[in-house]
Amino acid sequence: MGSLPDPGESTQPPPSFDDFQRQTSLMTSCTLLWKELSDHFTSLEQDLIRKSDALKAKVEALSQETQQSLNALESRESSISRSLSIAYETLEQATKMSISFSGEEAEAEVDDSEGLLMKLRGFCRRMAAKEFWIFVTSRKKEIELFRSALPKALSSCVDPPRFVLEAISEVFPVASSASNSNSYDLGWACVLLLESLIPVMVDPVLGKERMLVTPSIKGKAEEIAEVWKKSLEERGGIENVKTPDVHTFLQHLVTFGVVKEADVDLYRKLVVASAWRKQMPKLAVSLGLGDKMPDMIEELIGRGQQVDAVHFTYEVGLADKFPPVPLLKAFLKDAKKTATSILEDPNNSGRASVRDSFLTWKFGRHMAAKKEQSAIRAVLKCIEEYKLEAEFPPQDLKKRLEQLEKVKIEKKKPASPAAKRTRASTGGPMPPAKAGRSTNAYVSSFPSPPTYVRSHTQYSPTAVPAVPGVYGHSSRSPSYVYSPEAPPPAIVGSYPVSPVSFPAYGGYSNGMAPVYQQAYY
């Protein structure tokens, strides 16, 4: 009889080793999954925290900017009454001075800076814009005195902006018929007046942050700008507009604050076309072209205006992106190539005569030296202005400039009279100068050839040796005196004339350009 199983004893077989390994693998997978999920959520939490901190920082920055803007608006608003009171007092004082104007200032002698200031104040207090314009434009040599005296004189006007607009209306925006011939020559006066008007219109409390321009004057300034832009088509486009006129237009926009964002491309083209002007980099920034400066600099470099590109580079702080020294060296190299091309120009070779060939070559040599001189002076000025002596030592440039100056001096040095009147080949004297500019009279400095007298019985002239030719061919026909009762004999044949052949003049008629000294770069 079999035994009964014990109720407390399990009937399941014991787990095998495979089951144990399977359970262990499952636990490991769950652990790894839990760790992966934990890391993922931890990363999400850190990203959320980081983004939250960034948003908080932006909110704080915006709050600070908003607060600063509100404070600035509050300050501007609170300063309006004070600025207006100061402007009213200034206007009242200028009005009283204009009413009590005695005329002594208008008749003041302009012998020094004080006399010039009194004269200008006389025009301003009388609001005599036309007389003021004529006076300023007739004294261009005193431009530095005007630069310091004009802001003080314009402050004496009852309405300085209107006074300046009326004064320059003769040539801007469109020149009148009376001054059309020299309107471009007067651009310097327009720019000078517009620049001198800025310190007069600044807010007495906030300074240049706010310009005191009335709505009527600002509207008039906008109309003038529109008229100038419409006149571009009549002048043949931007390429045909004179630089002084462009400078006046851009300075007008900046002075009266009538810059339009829609015209930024036009401003950019105008600035690049007149980039050689000293004030253009600052005007470009004032016109809102700061973000377009890299493209403008690259365009100037491509056009061979590396020196202008250096000025623009330093104005906006891009010297690291556009190193100045390589640009200046490239500019000198281009100038040297241009000078060499002038020397090698086939138009400088002899054609009509050796003397003309020599003079033409000499003129070309002078022009080449002048071109190179201008380039060296521009580079030296850049080196001095931006303190580049350590990167680009100027000693070699100065030596080269001295050499070119000697070429210029040699051109101006007159030749000795003996050298002018001596032939290089035969050593004989050269013919004298003409007797007068208005006639073709020839005054000989040589003895006249012998005179032959015809006899009464013989009709053929006696043959005599010919006088040696002086100018490379046979001499003039000898003079014959015939008897009055006999007719002159018929001339058979013609006198032979050898072709004109001048000897080499100083060795420059060999058809080869002279050796030019090796450059310094």
Image (tube, helix red, strand yellow):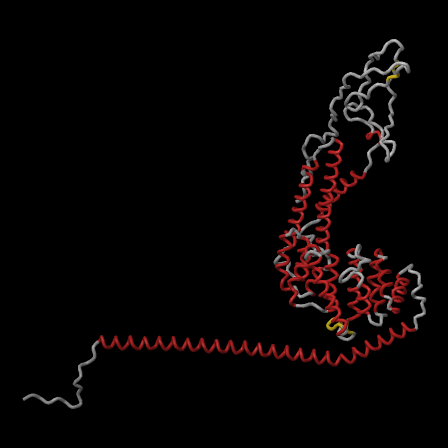
Q: Is residue 287 left or right of residue 124?
A: left
Q: Quadrant of residue 464?
A: top right
> Looking at the image, which is closer to me, 501 or 79?
501
The residue furthest top is: 457
Q: Relative to 290, does residue 463 appear above or below in the rendering?
A: above
x and y percentages locating residue 167 in the rendered image: 82, 64
x and y percentages locating residue 350 in the rendered image: 71, 33
Q: Quadrant of residue 162?
A: bottom right
x and y percentages locating residue 470 in the rendered image: 80, 22
x and y percentages locating residue 176 in the rendered image: 79, 60
> Looking at the image, which is closer to me, 502 or 50?
502
Q: Quadrant of residue 44?
A: bottom left
Q: Relative to 284, does residue 9 appear above or below in the rendering?
A: below
Q: Relative to 109, does residue 484 appear above or below in the rendering?
A: above
Q: Relative to 225, does residue 430 appear above or below in the rendering?
A: above
> Where does the C terminus fall, quadrant-wise?
top right
The residue furthest bottom is: 7
> Where does the N terminus fall, quadrant-wise?
bottom left
Write the residue at 71% across / 61% down: 231
How many marks do you count on the picture?
Answer: 0
The residue furthest left is: 1
Write the residue at 63% across / 62% down: 292
> Looking at the image, which is closer to me, 167 or 488?
488
